[in-house]
Image: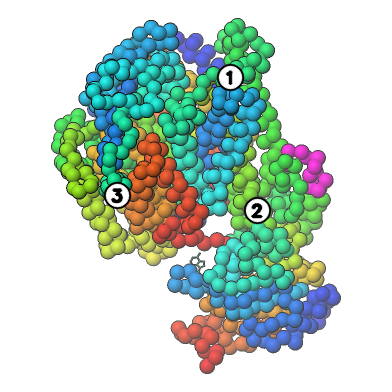
Amino acid sequence: MDAERTYSELAQRARTALASVNASPGVAKPDPILLAENVRRNFGGVTAVDVQHLEVQRGSITALIGPNGAGKTTLFNLLTGFDTPDTGEWMFDSKNLKKVVAHKTASLGMVRTFQLTKSLTKLSVIENMKLGATHQMGEKWWNGLLPFRYRKQEAIIERRADELLKRFKLDHMRDQYAGTLSGGQRKLLEMARALMTNPRLVMLDEPMAGVNPALKQSLNEHIRGLRDDGMTVLFVEHDMDMVHDISDWVVVMAEGRIIAEGTPEQISSNPAVIEAYLGTHQGKSLLEEENA
Amino acid sequence: MDIIKIIENTIAAFFGIDAAYFALAAIGLNIQFGYTGLLNFGQSAFMACGAYGLGMTSQYFGVGMWWGILIGLALVVILGLLVGIPTLRLRADYLAIVTIATAEIVRLVVRSVRFKQYFGGSDGINSFSTSFRSLSPFDPGAQYGIRPFQYSGYSLWTMIIGWSLVVIFSFLVYMLMKSPWGRVVKAIREDEDAVRSLGKNVYSYKMQSLIIGGVVGMFSGMIFALDRGSVQPDNYSRDVTFYVLTALVLGGVAKVRGSVIGPMMFWGLYVFSDNFLRELTKDKPFNLFGIGIIQKAQVGPVNYMLIGLGLMLLMTFRPQGVFGSKEEMALDGR
Amino acid sequence: MQAEFGDEVTDTNNSKSRVFAVGRAFAVLLAAMFMFSAPGNAQAADSDNSIIVSVQNQANNNGVSEKKPVVGVKISVTNLAGVAVGEGVTDSVGSVTIPVPAKDDYVVTLDVASLPSGVTLIEGTKTVVNIVKDAFTTNAKRVTFFAGTSGESGASLMDRIAQRLVDGVRLGLIIAICSVGLSLIFGTTGLTNFAHGEMVTFGGLIAFWFNVLLGIPLLIAAPIVIALGGVLGLAMNGVIFAKLRKRGIGLISQLVVSVGLSIMLRNMYLYQFGGRTRPLDDYSLQVAKHLGPVSITMRDLSTTIISFIVLMGVAAYLQRSRTGKAIRAVSDNPSLASSTGIDTQKIIRIVWFAGGALAAMGGVFRGLDEQVGFEMGSGLIFLMFAGITLGGLGSAYGALVGGFLVGLLVELASLVVPAELKNAPALLILIIVLVVRPQGILGRKQRVG
Ligand SMILES: Nc1ncnc2c1ncn2[C@@H]1O[C@H](COP(=O)(O)OP(=O)(O)OP(=O)(O)O)[C@@H](O)[C@H]1O
Ligand SMILES: [Mg+2]
């Protein structure tokens, strides 16, 4: 399968770079777009996230996997400013994001989707899409009163939105309320809407949950397409087939820590990962077992 | 029972100055509550900003009415920041709690003996409307129109200004809500995290919405004060906000039409109920099916009871009001 | 937000029969309210329109600004043309009701010569007050003249602080009692109940009904009142809010419904009870005991002690008993609790009952402390909100701690703030808490994403 696939120059460069990276947790990458150091978050007694070191290679598709409750969503929340960690620093494109609020991270080019879809049900599908565009003149209230000041830009945005909708096979729902979409369609809409922000890093929290297999295939293509366009994709997924299919690199979390990293092939044969998923460690921490 | 009089009064109330100032307050509240989902329970305080801005400038600073509007605007911004900064990052109910508390404190401050030299205490401020009156093209003493639409020259003047403001602000809000700005605030009403994840400064939009709504509320307070020719602290009690809210829900939230016709219907119904009950109890207390006796003096509370009941029933059975769409309401995550 | 309480949202298809059921329920509640309070009808408003003038001596006695009625002061009312409309002399509570023909502009004049010797009006108080037509928000317009010098009569600062502390403890305990229910209801159902103040008023007014109108001693009446308060809580939940939850109506809408309920109940009280405030019969005349620098009446001392015991009891109940633990579990995480086999609906009913009963108890105490009136609870709700926000919305102990602190701080602040603005510092507390630590002292942050 892999043999037939062609990669854009950027994507190929990322894949080659990753090929020479050592498959160990917290390993450094040649050209990281995202870098987290010692990020920890406690909820009461539970340590939801405790990431010593994590780098995400620019231009790659990186999968973040791990059993339920591993802390994947929490890590997303922390990195995007939706939650504040107890300790730690993290950088996006060598800009420290520690003090950066959620909406700023998005305008810096780092956009995320949510595990529980947040379609704005009372806006139409196309309005949802147009909302995603950044730097809109008409989003200043005084311009809002003067339609001629935003009409032109609005038309451009609308064209872009329509193109994306077509790509995601939502164009027939264009003028329906987003509330009338099915669960899978909402996932698609949310992803498409995130792309409207022109991100450099897309963080997708379980984008495929509830999407039918046929559509999954084409979604996979979209995600690869994003990479080929030069975007970096970090996504959370439970479906290992899909992870195998599209990711260049896989990061495995369990109990808040990163327990393994590597190419999909390396990960699928990693005993720590299998244990984390099957839960055979019987109360012992995975890391301790690995060290032993 | 004088049915003709009741009907006349009811019809007049639909178009009366009370409906106009309520409509302005409701248009403001609609921006905040209807479109953005902000529970501003202190609209009466924003109205007071307008009324006192106007009253104080001409009373104490001896400058013209236009300055009153500027000072009112400044007060609105200060008030908006005061209640907004601590609450707009938090869940919706905090804003409700803080605004209702602030409105109450504002009322206590302006009616206090301590600050009487500025706000006039519980007597309020009177006789500041001369410059507004002098702009009137009508003869203040004469009666214009035919019953039930008969007004003195001064009332006619305030009514024309009041309803003109209603039309202007309705149009502006309509434009605003059709614009990308409106799209953002409507999205915030539904799910602010989603909006934040798309790079919008949710906090700032909420603040803008709160203050813009407050400014419209300020004009409501001004019209009210100009009509009565006085500013009374007790006219800005928290219940005023709730009555405006009831009127808005009656018309239909997040609809420009709703925010105008709702208040008209509210006043029509209120005046009808009030007149009807007064006629009913004019000569002897009215016995309500053996469960209660309404005396003449109790008509007021009964009216307000009905408003409270009406708000509950509307919210439960017809949250979309007269003009909202059932379909939109029925979508997920109301 | 809704999803958190999603276990109750069984069916959002509002079938017709359900609509009728809720409608009927509303009607039943309404009728019940009317009937329940019907005997009070005799006490209804005194006349059509009236001006109620009250003269109060606010002299600061050792730092206590007790309102004492000034008896026998001559008050006259004229219309704008100077024609006499009515006159009267203040009675034993310092109040006189002067009927007027209509809501109109009037001039109220206090005859300074008729003030008792040694009593003067507070500096800056006018003896002539103009009333304009619009000032009649109800049928009765109230005018108050304050007498007495506002200077502190030689009490040292420490003594005044001590006195304020004692008063603050009393107010704080009452607020804590009233707001436990408010916080627990929020914790278990997510509802911010704006009608909670009316539950407090209910306690005060029913106590008045038993004690003054039926002549039942307060010690016997109070337990009945408290039980009835619980029943009111149950009724509010059963007839209104449980139904709303079942229909899947959002929390914001529920909040607005509670606002409507508050308006309705408050005006029902006004309808039954009239606009005046009145004292309860028992324990209304008390002599203050002086204990060192502070003075307190036996009544106030007893209510303070009882309040304290009750609050300790509530805390112990929440801490130890099975039900108490279940309540805290549901407050913490409703959906989790229900999945562990706790009957959330039952817990919610218990919380409403307990909340209503405690609020009614607070109402009785408040009625003893001040007087009873149709707005006594709605005047407190804002202090209760400040209290539960300070303590942490939804946290049971938070309400106790926060309510207590707010009462204490409000009283202490009145050392520097004029009495009429006594509640303003609570707003300040509220704002500071929200800026500095929005989850309150004992609350926890919410999950996003
Ligand atoms: N706000 C919160 N309060 C308390 N605990 C939390 C909170 N948010 C997350 N947790 C806990 O942190 C841990 C990690 O949760 P998280 O949602 O990040 O898992 P996840 O890896 O995304 O799981 P899944 O694959 O099921 O989505 C869980 O044990 C969860 O209960
Ligand atoms: Mg997750």
Q: Which region is colored magenta?
A: A144-155
Disc 2 secondary structure class: loop
Residue placed under numbered mark 1 in the picture: B129
Measuring from the top left, give residue C232's x and y in whole percent.
31, 41
Q: Determine if marks 1 and 2 fall on one subunit.
A: yes
- Secondary structure beneath dot 3 equals helix
**In this view, the mark in front (2 or 3):** 3
- The amino acid beneath tag 2 is Asn
Q: How much space separates mark 3 and mark 1, taking CA atoms?
A: 50 Å
- Which residue has dot 2 on it? B201
Q: Check if residue B98 falls in the magenta segment.
A: no
Residue C202 visible to an observer of this rendering: no
Pointer 3 indicates a residue of which chain? C
Q: Earlier in the sequence, mark 1 or mark 2?
A: 1
Q: Is residue B187 above or below residue B137?
A: below
Write the residue at 17% across / 31% down: C214
Q: Give residue C158's mark.
A: 3
CB within 8 Å, label 3 to label 1: no
Residue at the far bottom in the pictured view: A292
Label 2 CA crowd tier, 10 Å (few <14, some 14–19, many 20+):
some
How many residues crowd around disc 3 within 10 Å: few (fewer than 14), some, or many (20 or more)?
few
Determine the residue positioned at 28% across, 38% down: C153
Give amino acid for label 1. Ser
The answer to whether residue B230 is seen in the rendering is yes
Please tell me the numbered disc located at residue C80: none
Whether disc 2's CB lies below 8 Å from ligand 1 is answered: no
Kindly identify which chain the residue marked by label 1 belongs to. Answer: B
Q: Amino acid at mark 3?
A: Met
